[in-house]
Structures are given as C-alpha cells and as structure tokens.
Image (tube, rainbow, N blue to C red):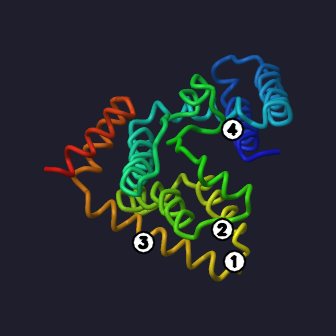
Amino acid sequence: MNQTALNLIAISIFAMTVSTILGPLVNLPPALPAIATFTVLGLATLDSFTWQGRGGTIVLGWLASFSPAHRARVARHEAGHFLVAQQLGIPVTGYTLSAWEAFRAGQSGQGGVQFDTQELEEQLQQKKLSVQLVDRYCTVWMAGGVAETLAYKTVEGGNDDLQKLRTTLAQLRLPDSQIQQKERWAALQAKNLIEQNQAVYDALVAAMEERRSVEDCRQLISAKIEE
C-alpha cells in the first residue's frame, strides 16, 4: 500500500478517535464514526490496488490546496524546475500545480513541470547515454528541491525528482558514491542558476501562480534576462 493510502488511513483513524471522544458531547450516533472510518479504509484500499493511489493523491492535494502557504511552496518548487530547464535548453511542455490539475490534464502523479524527454529516452533505449545530457537533466530534477530550500530551508516535495535522477544515473552503472556526488553537483548548479537569476525566478513564480501559459512564462524569462 502506498504512502498516500497510509496517510488517508491515519487521518481516518484519527478522525474516528476524536469523534468517539467528542461524539457524546454533540449527540453523535456511536456507530457513525465507525461506519465513516470503514468506508474511508475501504476506499483507500480500493484506490491503492485499482488506481495506484491516484484518488488519494487527488484528495490530499485538494485538501492541501486550501493552504496559501502550501500553494506558494508548490509554485516555488515548480518555478525552480521551469527556470533551470529553460536556462539549460530543456524544453518545458507544460505544468500543473496540483494533483487535481494534473488529473484534469490527463497526467499521472501530483502534477509539476513536464519536459520534452525524447532525446533522453532515445539514448536510454540505445544504452548510449551522453554524460552532458544526463548532467543537464539532473540539474533540472534537483532544481525544485533546491528552490524550496532557498525559500524555506526545508524540502517537502521532490521525492519523485530524486528517484528519476537516481534511476537515470543507475543506467550509467555508477557506484553509489558517485551518484551521491552527482546529486550534490547538480544541486549546486541549480542553486547557482536560481540565485544568479533571482529577479527572473521571483517573476516566474508569480506568473505560474496566475497559471500563465508556458509560452508566456518563456517570454517572461527571456525578457527579464535581457533586462
């Protein structure tokens, strides 16, 4: 069972416990908390095995979206990916800032910036990976977590990004020590690019929060850099 389903189960158990304690004070029927909890558990199990946890991801993402702080953190994370990808010549094809937006766009996962990975996928299939190309993608994948760290000193998202990086580097048959070194190097490159273009990055965050188009964001980056 994935982490999202486990989160839903934990929430439902907590809710049942609280409602059991407070139920008599508000004349809540004793059976109602148990019925609600078993319903949530059943849905979480169904979601985990049938939809790979996607339903739970959408629900939790929807609940989190009510927090302005969460929305701001997500926008900063994804703007880090977008800016660094643009700087390194990796085309951005789209972006979403929540699991619900990703679902509506026909994408899996929790949303995020989508890149054109055709060249990378072709090299993976041919087992002829270019180190330079891998380095560029690694820097882009690390950029989201780096952007969060610069703004909040901590990282809440980015596990999928890190998994993509490690899976790709594993294709090069590098030892774990070199993979970790690559992670640190890519994070440093991403940090430098964001800090060197801080005003551009801040403007991009605002544009993405307004859900401006990918082309608008590209033009904004280009115009700000020219300034």
Q: Position of residue 160 (x, y in %)?
A: 63, 52
> What is the spatial separation of the Cα atoms under label 4 and label 2, in whole angstroms?
36 Å
Identify the residue position indicated by label 2 in the image: 169
Give the foreground label among 4 and 2.
Answer: 2
> What is the spatial separation of the Cα atoms under label 1 and label 3, in whole angstroms?
20 Å
Q: Amino acid at mark 2?
A: Leu
Q: Tag 1's secondary structure?
A: loop
Q: Amino acid at mark 4?
A: Ile
Task: Name the residue nearer the viewer: 152 or 212.
Answer: 212
Q: Position of residue 166 (x, y in %)?
A: 66, 65
Residue beneath the point at 78% across and 19% down: 32
Q: Amino acid at mark 3?
A: Leu
Task: Name the residue nearer the viewer: 35 or 136.
Answer: 136
Q: Which mark is residue 11?
A: 4
Residue beneath the point at 25% across and 50% down: 200
Q: Tag 4's secondary structure?
A: helix
Q: Dot 4, crowdedness within 10 Å: few (<14), some or many (≥20)?
A: some
Which is more N-terminal, label 3 or label 2?
Answer: 2
Q: Quadrant of the N terminus?
A: top right
Q: Tag 3's secondary structure?
A: helix
Relative to 50, 79 lies left or right: left
Q: Are marks 4 and 2 in contact (CB under 8 Å)?
A: no
Q: Which mark is residue 174?
A: 1
Identify the residue position indicated by label 3 in the image: 188
Residue beneath the point at 70% across and 18% down: 28
Relative to 97, 58 lies left or right: right
Q: Position of residue 26 (x, y in %)?
A: 63, 19
> What is the spatial separation of the Cα atoms under label 4 and label 3, in whole angstroms?
37 Å
Q: Are marks 1 and 2 in contact (CB under 8 Å)?
A: yes
Give the foreground label among 1 and 3.
Answer: 1
